Image (cartoon, rainbow, N blue to C red):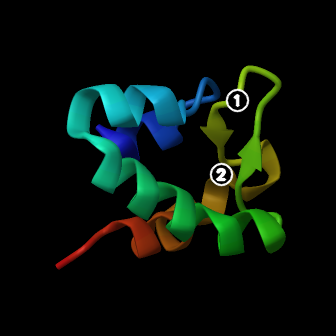
Amino acid sequence: MLITRLRTRHGLHPDEVERLFGRSVRDFFTATAIPLISAGDLEISPSGAYVIPESCWLTSNSILLPFIRV
């Protein structure tokens, strides 16, 4: 769900992550997002959702890799 939502222009809201998966996943998501925001690969929309900027859509796979835990 996280990967799919981040690939849309609506993005993923951290409250939704917490509601569906719990606080620990929200904390992981937020901590992982901070360096991506600093690099300009992820943004926070006016609604508070995390979104990949349109200019980065073609490189979204590399942006999403830090969210995938193996």
Q: Earlier in the sequence, mark 2 or mark 1?
A: 1
User: Looking at the picture, which amino acid does disc 1 mark?
Assistant: Gly
Other residues around mark 2 within 10 Å, as few (<14) / some (14–19) / many (≥20): some
Return the residue found at the far front: 23
Left or right of 57 on screen, residue 27: left
Q: Nearer the viewer, residue 67 or 30?
A: 30
Cβ atoms under marks 2 and 1 closer than 8 Å: no
Q: Mark on residue 48?
A: 1
Q: x%, y% of residue 43?
A: 76, 48
Q: Nearer the viewer, residue 28 or 52?
A: 28
Identify the residue shown where x is 77% and y is 31%.
45
Total marks shown come to 2
Quadrant of the rendered image containing residue 27: bottom left
Asked where in the image residue 31 lies, by quadrant, the reply is: bottom right
Q: CA distance from mark 2 to mark 1?
A: 19 Å
Residue at 81% in and 52% down: 55
Q: Secondary structure at mark 2?
A: helix
Q: Nearer the viewer, mark 2 or mark 1?
A: 1
- For label 1, the SS is loop
Residue, x 52% and y 73% (percent of image)? 62
Would you name the residue on which mark 2 appears?
A: 57
Which residue is at 63% across, 41% downward? 50
Q: Amino acid at mark 2?
A: Trp
From the top left corner, tell me how far across and down residue 58 is, in percent: 64, 58
Q: Nearer the viewer, residue 69 or 8?
A: 69
Within-10-Å neighbours for mark 1: few <14, some 14–19, many 20+: few
